[in-house]
Amino acid sequence: MEPIRVVQLEGLSAQLLGVTISFTILCTLVLVLRMWLRYKDAQLGLEDWLMLVGATFNQLHNGVVVWGTLIGIGTPDDKLALANMLEGAKVIMYWQLSYVVGSLFIKSSICATLIRISAKRRYKWLLVGMIALTTVTTIAAMTVVLVRCKPIAANWDPTVGVCLNLDLVVVFTYIVSAMNIFTDWSVAIIPMFILWDLQMQPRMKLVTSGVLGIGVFMPARTFLTVASDNIAHIVLWTVVECAMGIIAGCLPMLRKLIHGYLAESFSAPVRLDQPETELVTIGRLGKKHNGVSTLFDASVTRSRTATVGHGDEDGIGDSDSTRRIIKATRSMEQMRSDSR
C-alpha cells in the first residue's frame, strides 16, 4: 500500500483549512482574555471551567480537521491514494467524537451562565433540563460511534471486521439531529426572556440577546449537514458552530474589558492633588444587582470625599459612566473652591 501523502489543497479543502485555522486563533484569544479577566477579578466559576474544557476539546477537534484536510478531506476521491482514504475514515471517527464532546461542554457553559443570572426558578430548571438532554444526546452519539463497528478499526478499514446496517445509523442520525435542533433553539431563545427581567437599557438587552442568541442560526447548520452528501461541508459547519458558541459564550465577559477601555479613553483627566475617585464595577465587587448576580458589569463610581448623583437608573452604558466621573470631579473642585 502506498504511504499517506499530503494532498495539494485547493477549492473546498483550502477553504476548510483557512476557516479552521482562523477560528482556532480567534477562539484561543477570546478564551484567554475571558479566563484572565475572571481570574483577575476572582470570579472564576463553573461556567468558566466548562467553557475551558469545551474549548480544549474544540482545539482537539480543529486539530483533527486540519490533519484531515491535509490528507484528503475536501479533495475529490479520485485524487486520493488508498492509504489517504483509510486515514481519512479514521479522522472522521475522531472528528465525530471530539465534536460531540466539545459541543456538550460549550452549551453547558452557556446554560450555566444563564442559570447564574436568571431570577426565575422556571428558567433555571429549563436550562438544567437542556444540559441533561444535551448530555444524554452526546452519550448516545458517542456510543453509536464506538460500537457501530467491531473492532473499532473496522470504522476505517472494512476488511478487519463488520459494522451495523447503515440504515440504522442514518435513522439515529436524524433523531440526534432533531434533538440538537431543539437544544440549539432553546439555548438561543431562553436568554431573551431572562434578560427581559433584568434592569438594563433596552439597547443593551437587544445587543446582549443577539450575542447570546447566535445559536439561533445553528439549526440551519443541522439541516444542511443532514442534507449534504459531502463530508467536508459537514465538517466545515461543525467548525463554525463550535467557534460561534465559544465566542457567544465569552463576549459578555469581555464587555468589561471594552467598557473599561472606553471609559478610560473618554473620562476627564484628574489632577494629582485631587482626592481619589475610584472606578469599580459591580462584577468586581462580587455583589448582586436587584437580587440577581449580574453578568454584565455595569460601571458605578464612588468617591471617598464626595457623593455622586445616581443619574439615570437604567444607564449602564459607557456614556453614563463618563458623566458620573465628570460629575464627581466637578463636585470635588467645587468643594475645594468653597473651602478657600
Image (spheres, rainbow, N blue to C red):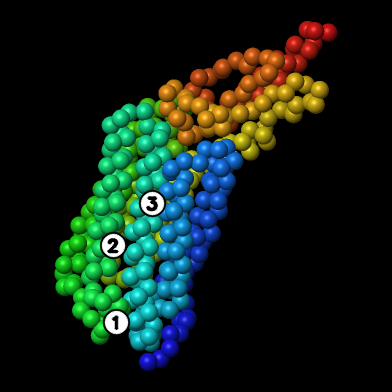
Label 3 with label 1: CB-CB less than 8 Å = no
Q: Residue at x 63, y 21 (%)?
A: 302
Callout 2 secondary element: helix
Q: Of the residues under marks 3 and 2, which one precedes in the sequence?
A: 3
Instruction: Say which residue label 1 marks.
Output: 157
Amino acid marked by disc 2: Met
Q: Of the residues under marks 3 and 1, which one precedes in the sequence?
A: 3
**Can residue 177 be seen in this snapshot?**
no
Other residues around mark 1 within 10 Å, as few (<14) / some (14–19) / many (≥20): some
Where residue 178 is drawn, which disc sits there?
none
- Horizontally, residue 306 falls left or right of residue 124, namely right
Q: Position of residue 48 (x, y in %)?
A: 47, 45
- Quadrant of residue 97 within the rendered picture: bottom left
- Horizontally, residue 95 falls left or right of residue 158, namely right
Q: Position of residue 90 (x, y in %)?
A: 35, 75
Callout 3 secondary element: helix
Label 3 vs label 2: CA separation?
14 Å
Callout 1 secondary element: loop
- Horizontally, residue 145 falls left or right of residue 212, namely left
Label 3 vs label 1: CA separation?
31 Å
In the rendered image, the vertical position of residue 146 relative to residue 37, given as above or below: below
Q: Residue at x 40, y 50 (%)?
A: 106
Instruction: Say which residue label 2 marks.
Output: 142
Amino acid marked by disc 1: Asp
Instruction: Say which residue label 3 marks.
Output: 105
In the rendered image, the quadrant that contains the C terminus is top right
In the rendered image, the vertical position of residue 34 relative to residue 205, given as above or below: below
**Can residue 32 be seen in this snapshot?**
yes
Other residues around mark 2 within 10 Å, as few (<14) / some (14–19) / many (≥20): some
In the rendered image, the vertical position of residue 225 relative to residue 31, given as above or below: below
